[in-house]
Amino acid sequence: MRAPTSSSTMPSLVVRMLEELRVEDGHRVLEIGTGTGYSTALLCHRLGDGSVVSVEVDREVSGRAAAPLGACGYQPELVVGDGLAGHRDGAPYDRVIATCGVLTMPGSWIDQTKPGGIVLATVGGWLYASELARLTVHGDGTASGRFLGGQISFMLARPHLPPPLGLLPDLGSGEERLTTLGPNLLTGDWTARFVAQLAAPRAQHISMTIEGRTQQILIDVEAGAWAVLTEADGGWTVRQGGPGRLWNAVEDQVARWRTDGAPALDRFEITVTPDEGQIIRWPGGRWSRG
C-alpha cells in the first residue's frame, strides 16, 4: 500500500495561514503542496490565477486539483515536482507558503523570494512537535522571523520523513542511571517536546512493553545512538548506548529552557543564513540546527 502524500487542511487553518501570509494586491505567490486545491483557489480569488504557482510532488494529486480549480474558472500554474526545490522558473516571488512540514527551511524558498518577501511554513521534527513560522527575507540572502503559536502541524515533506527503524540495537547494553526528567515530555507538553527535538533532531520515539513494563525509547537510527526510559520505584531510569548520549542532550537542553523561564513557542525566533543554516532561539537561549 502506498503511503499518503497529501492530506486535506482544515478550512479554518487555511484561512489563518493566508491571513498570516499578508498578501497584497500585485503579489506573486508560490504555494508548496497543492493538495485538494482549496487554498490555491483562495489565493487565485485574492490575487488572480496568473499570480499563483502551486507545486505538488504527487502527479495524481495535482491532476485531481486541476479539475475543480478549472470549474471555478481558475488556471494557476500547477507544477509537479519536489516542492522543497521551489520553482525557480517563476521566481522571484513575494510570498511562499507551504502546506507541508519541514525539518529545516529550504534555502531554495528563501533564494526565490524577493527581499522583503515572506516565507510561511511549519517547522518540526521526528518527535512531531512543530510550529508555524513566518520569516522575512533580507537582501543579503538571509531570512528571519518567529514562530506564531497554535501547535500547528502538517505532514512532513517526503524527503524529510524519518528513516525506517529497522532492527533495534541491544537495549540491554549501555549505561544506566537515574533521571529526574521522565518521558512524559515526549508525549505531553508541546513546547518541551519541541525543545527536546532541537537537542536530538534525528531521534525518533517509540513505546514498548517488555515483561509487563512500559519502556519509552528514543533512537537515532542514522547515528546509532539510543536511550531507554523505564519506570522504577516511582521514578525513572535511563539506559543509553551508541555514540553520544541522547538523553543527556535532552536533559541539558530542557534544563536551559526551563532556567530561561520556559518561554512558549510564540516567543521563539528563527533565522536562516547561507553560512549557519537554520538557527532557532528563545529569549535567553540559542540553538542551531540544519
Image (tube, rainbow, N blue to C red):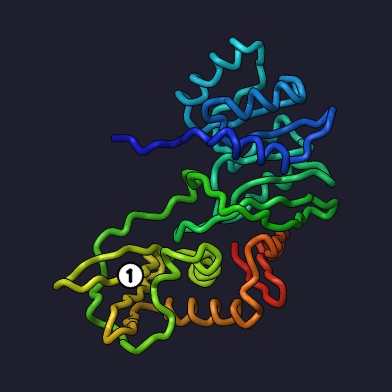
Q: Is residue 110 left or right of residue 255?
A: right
Looking at the rendered structure, the secondary structure element under dot 1 is strand
Measured as percent of width and height from the top left, residue 125 is found at 50, 58
Q: Nearer the viewer, residue 235 or 64?
A: 235
Q: Nearer the viewer, residue 153 or 164?
A: 153
Q: Is residue 279 visible?
A: yes
Residue depicted at 36% across the width and 68% down the height: 219
Measured as percent of width and height from the top left, residue 256 is found at 60, 81
Q: Where is the C terminus found, in terms of image quarters?
A: bottom right
Question: In this figure, what is the number of numbered marks?
Answer: 1
Residue type indicated by callout 1: Ile
Measured as percent of width and height from the top left, residue 62 is found at 52, 24
Residue depicted at 78% across the width and 39% down the height: 22
Q: Nearer the viewer, residue 115 or 67?
A: 67
Q: Quadrant of residue 210?
A: bottom left
Q: Which residue is most to the left?
A: 211
Q: In the picture shown, does residue 257 fall above or below 264?
A: below
Residue occupied by mark 1: 217
